Amino acid sequence: MFTTPERPGHFIDNQTTPAQGGGRLTVTNPSNGTECAQIARGTSADIDRAIGSARTAFQERWGGLATLERSRVLQRWSQAVLAHQEELARLEAMETGKPISQARADAVALARYVECYAGAANTLHGRTIPHQAGYTVLTLREPHGVTGHIIPWNGPMQIFGRSVGAALAAGNACVVKPAENGCLSLLRVAALGAEAGLPAGTLNIVTGLGAEAGQALTEHPGIDHLSFTGSPETGRRVAIAGAAHHCPVTLKLVGKSPQIVFADADAEAALPALVSAIVLNAGQTCSAGSRLLIERPLYEPLMERLSNAFSALRAGPAHLDLDLGPMVNRKQQQRVWDFLSDAQASGIEMAAQGEIVDEAPADGFYQAPVLMRDVPTSHRLWREEVFGPVMAVRAFDDEDEAVALANGTDFGRVAGVWTRDGSRQLRMAHRLQAGQVFINHDGAAGGLELSFGGVKDSGDSQGIGFEAMYDFSRLRTVAIRHG
Ligand code: NAD
């Protein structure tokens, strides 16, 4: 079973520190509905302190450090995360409810992100620009200064690794506001960073509520760049708050990602990938393959196999390490229930449902995985992100219809295409409006070196890969007239 750290506080200036005013918040373990921790309830005073500390670190320590030295610290930190993989995984499994093996994989992904960005730090270059005779023009790529990071609860370690790893490698100091159900692992990760040599103030974590600590971070004039991952509604608020003090903002928002299976596809290979695309993290990922489009000749045979696969899925507490854990909180569970009751009221047929195991405590926030067939394109189950283990399926008749259906939402996060036809693979890759297109697989085996942009309302940040370093740096031009 998992254990709770003793009264965690904020992490500011490399020290654990209580909230000014002493406020605390209760974190609920989604696997059983009981209290798992009391965290510090951050206020604008805590944010102010963290930003002051980050500013000093940027100006006096981290910002001026040789790139190679920065890389070395990040390498050591990455190794420390790997060495503490089990401890970190247990914390994250406890607070988010994700199965323990998934949490272990997330700790490894965090270590790899930090390692990748440590390697990339030395390759973030400006360039020279040919201009007129008598001039030399060059660009300088520099850190923003103090960056703010708002991290959600669905993948605390992974999303922190992408965002903070890239920002630190580019030379910024960071202030992080994690989600209430996603901060215990990150507080420990930050302490490991201090032990690995991150100078005091380089990485600060202020826990608390979005509307308090989060909002204070977005409104603070001392923040030079804001990175947000989460819902479109909150993303809009963050962008407006940033704009009010001319602070650049990058957004990573939600998706309603299609998986498109043509009749010539290798259905055997596709089946497990289609299932895991929606079951991973109980469907609480922005890249979840929540819409499935099947070419009509394959529709009934594949639905039969999918139904069998869904019926065999099991949800239960994180420590049992089943196919999926609970939803992260009561609000998220209720959100899924609302979608399903709307679907039922509209007469949408449930083709199959998995099981919640008997050992799952009644007060946990469980939702069995659900397969819904022939979902109308006008229904919200087809158009809006559920962020739960609910797959919406419908048939299509030709390539044009598949493209129109796939692109027919407000989002463009990820798309999957399953076909043996090489020309069609390339045509689809060009026609699909999605930040990432996967052909005959899903997720590129983790693919943390790959850029992960969004199209339409899925956000503007590149998020992952080397390109994320551009999010966390700015370009200045120097023009020298030498005759
Ligand atoms: P949210 O967007 O409100 O929360 C994400 C983060 O933003 C959290 O750290 C939260 O504390 C912070 N936040 C909230 N209000 C803020 C504010 N006014 N200013 C600054 N920061 C603020 O998401 P939620 O309410 O936890 O979940 C709602 C929906 O969001 C989900 O159903 C899902 O669709 C989506 N979501 C998406 C992702 C993703 O990875 N893209 C992650 C979590 C949730």
Image: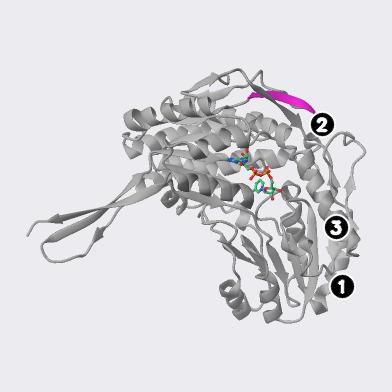
Mark whose residue sits in front, 1 or 3:
3
Q: Examine the residues drawn in magenta and state their main secondary structure.
A: strand
Residue at horizontal 69 percent and vertical 31 percent from the top: 90
Which residue is farthest front? 244
| Horizontal and vertical percent position of residue 372 | 85, 62
Q: Earlier in the sequence, mark 2 or mark 1?
A: 2
Q: Residues within 10 Å of mark 2 (few under 14, many from 20)?
A: some
Picture disc at residue 33: 2
Q: Earlier in the sequence, mark 2 or mark 3?
A: 2
**Magenta span covers which residues?**
33-40
Residue at horizontal 57 percent and vertical 47 percent from the top: 237
Q: Residues within 10 Å of mark 1 (few under 14, many from 20)?
A: few
Contact flag, marks 2 and 1 (Cβ < 8 Å): no
Residue 189 vertical placement versus 405 (above, below): above
- Exactly how many numbered labels are in the figure? 3
| Horizontal and vertical percent position of residue 176 | 53, 35
